[in-house]
Amino acid sequence: MMSNKELNELASFFTETNDAFSLYFEPYTPTDLSHRDEYIVAKERIQETIGGMHAVAPGSRAMVERAIETVAEMEGNHGLSKVIFACARRNFWREYDLPGKFGIRAEMGQTFAIAPLVTQQENQPCFGILLADRNHTRILLLQAREIRELSQDSREDQWKFRTTGTKKSVHLERAKEQPVLKHFASVAQQLLRLHQQVRFEGLLVGCRQELWPEIESEFPSDLRRIVLGHFAVDPGLVSLQEVREKAEKIIAQHDSEELNVLAQRAANAEAASGLGAIGLAQVCEALERDEVRTLLWPDPRGWFGRSAAMCAHCGHLDLKMTAKCALCGNEMRKFMRADEALVRKALSGGVEIRALRHTSLHPEEQISALLRFRAERNTPQALAS
């Protein structure tokens, strides 16, 4: 994870000479490509995104070549994306290995491209995972694609019962289940204490399918309300990688459904003149008035063709590429992608940012916001106050 200090440093970086280089590279290793072939494909994609090396100054060209060589040495990079920010003229180089779905993106301009980074940073919650059966218990934490095991416990079934005759005793069967239920209740209390300490945002459970009702029945209400789902595994045999893959599928599905609900709520609120804003112009105006609670933005891996300008002095946003700020008269910084301006505005105001991936909404409706309140004053008046 990147610190807020580093993120703010990248967000404030500016150069008049248009040589701030940003590279996002999400590794992939198709079965029909060798690592060398993957490197060639990556090099072509990077050069294509910055319009070819012929338009790059010699110093920056060497820096871009260094970035390409860095990507060439990754060999999968343990599933982490390579993110590089560099400026040859300022002798600036920052290199990160980060979790997240970034795709391949390379840009050269006056500022670094931080919109994908901010979106990913704002969406790295911690999840608790319980693996349990009658004799095994494992508790894990998953955050930013990194999974670690906190505790593991194995117990032998000490409750042995013998029955005679052809009919089983209902009383003995019930007595046999009591230690198991006590075991699940003890595990539930352990999970609750961990949740109170760590405050993980969701809980997933891996168990044998037939045991799920018994495990869930022992959860207190504080745990039940954060359960995202359960999956079938043998807790004593499953590997951490298998657990992560199964958990991430459930989390991705949950996030997609949650974000669609948020976006639809923003659309409904906007339609009813309530606490919602839809479309770039309305969202920009709401950010100007400091009304926004949650900014919902299209997948940062996609191309967004609108531009915007932002005043470095007062933070005023303008969808017209004006040279001077209409509020304070200072020079406006121009962003070819409007998301770069809006996320900087949101970042400075402490606004939550969520990326709408795999949404069924129309592209224009994806740019939306949930508001804290709705001001009835125009933007210059609000800012002047």
Image (spheres, helix red, strand yellow):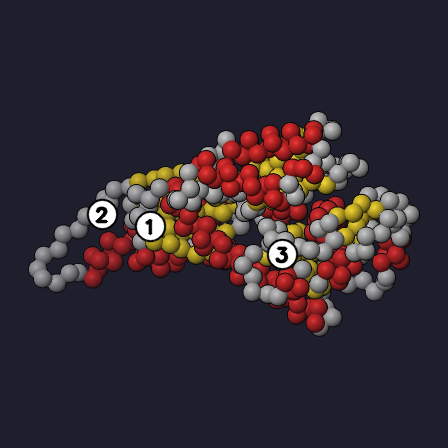
* Foreground of the two, 188 or 325: 325
Which percent across, then down, holds residue 308?
A: 77, 52
The residue lying at 33 percent from left, 50 percent from top is 233
Q: Quadrant of the N terminus?
A: top right
Q: Is residue 303 left or right of residue 233?
A: right
- Work out which residue is located at the far right of the displayed protein and give it: 329
Badge 3 vs badge 2, beta-carbon distance below 8 Å: no
Tell me which numbered mark, 1 or 3, is placed earlier along the sequence.
Answer: 1
Residue 349 rendering spot, x and y as whole percentages: 74, 48
The Cα–Cα distance between marks 1 and 3, rounded to whole angstroms, is: 35 Å
Q: Amino acid at mark 1?
A: Val
Q: Disc 2 marks which amino acid?
A: Trp
Q: Nearer the viewer, residue 49 or 376?
A: 49
The total of numbered circles placed on residues is: 3
Q: Which residue is mark 2?
A: 159
Please say if 284 is above or below 361.
above
Q: Give coordinates of residue 115: x percent, y percent.
A: 66, 47
Residue 136 appears at what percent x and percent y?
Answer: 31, 44
- On the image, numbered disc 1 is attached to which residue? 233
Q: What is the distance, in whole Å, between disc 3 and disc 2 at their CAs?
A: 56 Å
- For marks 3 and 2 on the same chain, the one whose residue lies earlier in the sequence: 2
Which of the two discs, 3 and 2, sits closer to the camera?
3
